[in-house]
Amino acid sequence: IVRINTTAPSIPQDKASLGAWGPVIKFPVIPAGVFVVSEKPRSTRLLLFAAYTEQTFGNGGNGRTQFAEYNLESGAVSKRTISNTQHDMFCPGISTLQDGRVVITGGSNAERTSIYDPSANAFVSSPNMQMARGYQSSVTLSSGKVFTLGGSWSGGVTVKDGEIYDPTTNQWTKLPGALVRGAVTQDVAADKRDNHHWFFGWRDNSIFQAGPSKQMNWYSAVGSGTVQTAGTRDTEDAMCGIFVMYDALRGKIITAGGSPNYHDNAPNKRAHHITISAPGTAPVVERLPDMAYPRSFSNAVVLPDGKVLITGGQTFARAFTDENSVLVPELFDPSNMTFRQLTPMKTPRNYHSTSLLLPDGRVFAGGGGLCHDIANTCPGISSNHPDGEIFSPPYLFNSDGSDAQRPKIVGLSSDTSTDGYTVRAGGTLTVSVDQQQQGLTFAMLRVGSNTHSVNTDQRRVPLEDIQQNGSLYTLNLPSDNGVMIPGDWYLFVIFAQGTPSISRTVTVAL
């Protein structure tokens, strides 16, 4: 087994430049999927899930999923089996709705839809998709509806054009004009060519597809759907690469890594910067400096300060192994368009690993492994990682390695709710902070979900239209729901040196 750069810094001051990982947290399942439970005034729990068993998956109709719940504040871990929806949710699409519910589609039970309701802490069945899918991506749109496309890993290898879920009517509708053919890769395996699309919900029910196919596309979910090419991002496909909208106000995206074929293939270390504007117009694509390491099966999270943290992955894509693991995270800084290396993680995080931004500005990384049949076809169980770890970015430390002081949100309201729990695009938030300081900034980050290197829920919006009166700040939100996608968002206040507050959860409602 080759592990790259496994020696963590021992000097406390290194935390201020390289960050620090916490202890490994044991779970009763391998977290191949994870999402944040919607709560006010802030979220405190993660739900993590594997497959029909805790550490192996199946391709058939097993009708149950093994979940764990992790309390971020108490550290408590509990396990639960979800069987009432008759849905093995392994390898699904995941999207969060305006009201905090989470739509989980397809996977091993390829036609099924399950919805997690945080108000009841329970799952309910929803109508089946029009087409059975697995490994598909889904994305929440400016209208609050959910779009999905592709997904031939399960449910048969066939042409899987788009469809849309309307939470108001609780129905799926085919979009025959949203053709998948322009968004497929040239993978040697036919069932891997329409997987894990890099989707960004945008204005007027449009979707920008940045990858993993080298061809990019604009989709529309209006009427019966449409698609038009948006040019090429690169000269080759990049399956299981990373994609993040770090500044939705300006349509700015970073993509990096990935490989031409899903398995047994060398990934690249190339990175691209993409800027999108009006739906249907050609994006601006720029080649960035390379990452330090080629990566496949890595994950990426946008931070409150706009930087992007890339964790895990392999320098040669071989699923269910810890071979060629990259333990060193890289941090992309949009101010100078460069990457730098941070403190290595403790555990390899490769295929079936996940990462998410937490409400306090730290980052969860977990999982890896979860093979099909250990007795017969898997390389071994040493690559199974039913655990996670939490990264504290450099902005949480002083130069001597001690914990940095955070700003605090002590009061919050909006023009539609006195408690600040909801706001509309174009509305205002009024924030009271604990101390007046020069250079405070504010950002909203949409609460994420993750499976298979796909997190279409996350994005960051810097709030720049601000009026200040002492320690009271009035924040004017962008008026476009293509920027402010409906759903739960973290609101952060950030010191001039980059240290964020603990966030408040705010729902952007239609």
Image (cartoon, rainbow, N blue to C red):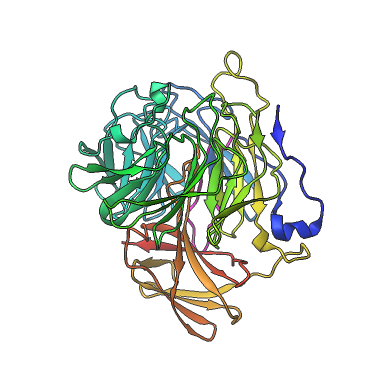
Rendering coords of residue 153 (x, y %): 41, 26
Pick out the residue farthest to the left.
223
The image shows residue 265 at horizontal and vertical percentages of 53, 26
Would you say residue 422 sits in the magenta stretch? no
Identity of the residue furthest to the top in this view:
376
- Quarter placement of the N terminus: top right
For the image shown, how many numbered marks are present on the structure? Answer: 0
Q: Which residues are magenta?
A: 30-46
At a point 76% along the width and 57% down the height, the residue shown is 14
Query: Toward the viewer: 230 or 468?
Result: 230
Q: x%, y% of residue 496?
A: 60, 73
Q: Which residue is at 43% across, 58% downward?
A: 488
Report the side of 166 relative to 375 (left or right): left
Question: Within the image, what quadrant is residue 156 found in?
Answer: top left
Q: Main secondary structure of the magenta part?
A: loop
Residue 427 locus on image (x, y percent): 35, 72
Q: Is residue 493 above or below residue 61?
A: below
Q: Is residue 246 visible?
A: yes
**Height in image: 418 above or below 21?**
below
**Above/below status of 353 relative to 255:** above
Q: Is residue 418 visible?
A: no
Q: Residue at x 81, y 55 (%)?
A: 11
**Image-based side of 15 in relation to 497, left or right:** right
Toward the right, the furthest residue is 11
- Quadrant for the C terminus, please: bottom left
